């Protein structure tokens, strides 16, 4: 009986702690902070300005070309971009050399926007694992975040994007 109680209490504590971590993750990394910490340039060397994303729903994926989960995430993000078109901005951000990013983009025949970060993702931007991906509303607030989460083309995410676009 005592073992059952300990297991139940442990599970309850795990759920509570997980809830706090997820809530904290959603509050972290507002879109504006990204531009305070790094300069983003596209694969042609043109700098991305924060104002280009104003009043837009945005997904940012911090990725690495060697990351298997980043590869698995690509089709999901591509489907979202195809579904929402110009209403949704999807930014793929890496600190790897541009030539690696170009090969990655070509491999997937991707129409997503790829950007090189002037700072390192792990120590400077706080990315701990790949991919780390955020969905932002039009005000730059995090609606959803996933670390090593590859499934983005889901009814829940689609509903979040539709709701964010409506406001």
Image: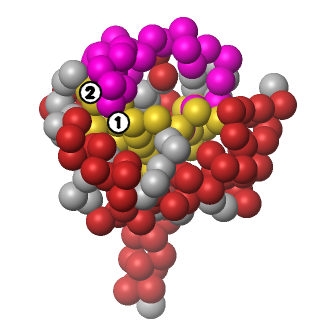
Q: Position of residue 100 (x, y in %)?
A: 21, 46
How far is mark 2 from mark 1, CA to CA?
6 Å
Assign a secondary structure to mark 2. strand
Residue 44 placement: quadrant: top left
Looking at this rendering, what residue extends furthest in the right direction? 166
Residue identified by numbered label 1: 93
Q: Mark 1 packing: few (<14 Cα in 10 Å), some, or many (20+)?
A: many
Q: Which residue is mark 2?
A: 117
**Placement of 26 over or under 6, stated as above or below:** above
> Is any part of residue 18 visible from this angle?
no
Q: Secondary structure at mark 1?
A: strand
User: As displayed, is residue 7 above or below residue 20?
Assistant: below
- Tell me how the rendering is colored: secondary structure
Farthest-out residue, bottom = 1
Q: Position of residue 7 (x, y in %)?
A: 41, 79
Q: Which residues are magenta?
A: 34-59
Structural crowding at the residue carrying mark 2, measured as other residues with C-alpha within 10 Å and reported as few (<14), some (14–19) or many (≥20): many
Pick the front one: 152 or 87: 87
The percent position of residue 60, horizontal first and vertical second, equals 46, 37
146 in magenta: no
Is 10 above or below relative to 95?
A: below
Quarter placement of the N terminus: bottom left
Q: Is residue 51 magenta?
A: yes
Give the answer, above or below, for where 8 lies relative to 3: above
The foreground one among 69 and 98 is: 98
- Determine the residue positioned at 35% across, 41% down: 62
């Amino acid at each position: 009986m005592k073992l059952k109680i300990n297991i139940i209490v442990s599970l309850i504590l795990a759920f509570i702690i997980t809830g706090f971590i997820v809530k904290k993750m959603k509050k972290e990394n507002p879109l504006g902070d990204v531009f305070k910490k790094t300069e983003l340039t596209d694969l042609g060397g043109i700098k991305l300005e924060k104002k280009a994303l104003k009043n837009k729903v945005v997904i940012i994926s911090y990725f690495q070309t060697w990351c298997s989960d980043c590869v698995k995430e690509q089709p999901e993000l591509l489907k979202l971009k195809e579904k929402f078109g110009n209403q949704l901005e999807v930014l793929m951000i890496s600190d790897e050399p541009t030539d690696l990013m170009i090969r990655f983009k070509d491999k997937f025949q991707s129409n997503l926007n790829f950007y090189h970060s002037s700072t390192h993702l792990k120590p400077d931007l706080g990315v701990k694992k790949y991919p780390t991906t955020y969905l932002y509303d039009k005000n730059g607030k995090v609606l959803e975040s996933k670390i090593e989460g590859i499934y983005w083309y889901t009814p829940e995410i689609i509903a979040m994007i539709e709701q964010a676009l409506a406001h």
